[in-house]
Amino acid sequence: MPPRKSPPQVVLLPLGQPEPGVSLQRWLYEALRSAILGGRLPAGSKLPSTRALAEHYKLARGTAQAAYQQLLSEGYLDAQTGSGTRVCAVLPDATLNAGYVRRKVVAQVDTPRTPPATPWIERLDAITPIFARRPMVLGLRPFFPHRGDTQAFPVDLWRKLHIQQLRASRLSILLDSDPGGLPVLREAIAGYLAIARGVQVPAERILVLNSVQQGLDLCLRLLVPGESQVWMEDPGYPGARQLIDVSGVQRVDVPVDAFGIQVEEGVRLAPNARLAYITPSRQAPLGGELSPARRLALLQWAAQHGSYIFEDDYDSEYRFVAKPIPALRSMPAAEQSVILAGTFSKLLFPSIRLAYLVLPAHLLESFTRAAALMSRHANSLSQAVLADFIDEGHFDRHVRRMRKLYAARAEAFSEAAQRHWQGLIEVPEIRAGMDIACNLLEVSEQDAFARLQAAGIDVLPLASYCVKARAAGLVMGFAPYDERAVEDAAKAVAVALR
């Protein structure tokens, strides 16, 4: 009988050099874990003592001991008196480890696979998602649209409210919560809507979500059967258009003019549409308001056909020439057919990821159950902090302060355009919002976009919002940029386009 082989003895395995900014303990832990998962330290392998390892790599012995201890606690190593420290025969999370090995060790020889040809994947392949993955941007170049000034947000106050929520007596906030949203936040939103948007609604009819996109997705799943039709503004918000496209329903593009969506044209094109996506308070991206006559016509169409209206109320609070106009949902005839969607990402900061729907009573149960199934609930801690932020008056003060700040920057933007863009770009009156759709007068849209990108100026072509061709234009933002930045960027735009 052949002698039994003893486990291989590992003397001092080459582990590479630590990356800049990574602690020595973290480097040693990750290097040893990678060696274990990659097979360079097979099961049963004996590791050198912490003293020998520390001396060889010129580390403090405490660093080696801490790395070993972490690997022991996670189940990668086993230490027994008399036999030293060895690699465990069975590693934790075998499935995860196998995936780790594939990525780190044999990814270069892995055979590529083609995604399955499911309808969703096929429809996704046909578009370039507006929310495509991209590296984190620390600063936005003028005149990137759809962004507020996060530097002006009261971070210290927000931190203080967070600390208050994390007191020992309040730690239940870290548990699962109501899938419809924290009652205290729904009450706060209901109070805000009554004052700021003219919408009188019980708190129980408000559903707290992560985003308006999630709310629209719920509507498409629950209210639009099969290949039914959905009205979409043209031009309109690309994120909504793409979500409608991948959902498998039939999108009907309804033209928009200075008075909002042309309801008569929508009725002519698709009278039996199940849903209409609209931005009535400030049309995205043209900026107009839906006229009173069209509001009534839209509500009448929905009532007659049993259809629903998705009202995206994305930044209506930032209105400079007068008080914000009431939401469409505030009209008495809207209660049964209008689903009002609002977000705090525009009003506070994008990463808060909190939004809400105001639902007709007969939809509340099904929408809440679907939201619970898809995402359990929105972040409870952020909900609680936001509720305090609203109830203590900070939200109202912040919005009023930002409205004044953005109005000043809109004026600076318009004045800089008058000084530098004569004959190049026409800037309409800026009545609200954080950006404006401008008209190109001489240079083509494609040429202007390429020139501005080369000059370090970020804009979006108006064509990216359109299905049917329109006059050349650019959507340009002003909210995050102070007067000096606006002036310097305006000069750069003029140089690039001339």
Image: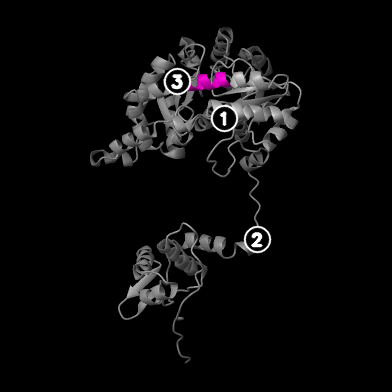
13 up-or-down from 111: above or below: below
- Check disc 3 and report the residue beneath it: 360
Q: Position of residue 18 (x, y in %)?
A: 48, 63
Q: Main secondary structure of the magenta part?
A: helix
Q: Position of residue 300 (x, y in %)?
A: 56, 11
Q: Secondary structure at mark 2?
A: loop
Residue receiving disc 2: 111
Q: Earlier in the sequence, mark 3 or mark 2?
A: 2
Label 1 sits on what residue type?
Ala
Measuring 56% from the left and 65% from the top, which residue is drawn there? 105
Residue 28, quarter of picture: bottom left
Residue 371 seen anywhere in this rendered image of the structure: yes
In the rendered structure, which amino acid carries the disc numbered 2?
Answer: Thr
Does residue 311 appear in this view?
no
Specify start and end residues of the magenta stretch as a single range.
405-412
Give the image quarter of residue 172.
Answer: top left
The extreme bottom residue here reads 1
Of mark 2 and mark 1, the one earlier in the sequence is 2
Identified by mark 3, the residue type is: Pro
Per the image, the residue denoted by label 1 is 485
Q: Is residue 436 magenta?
A: no
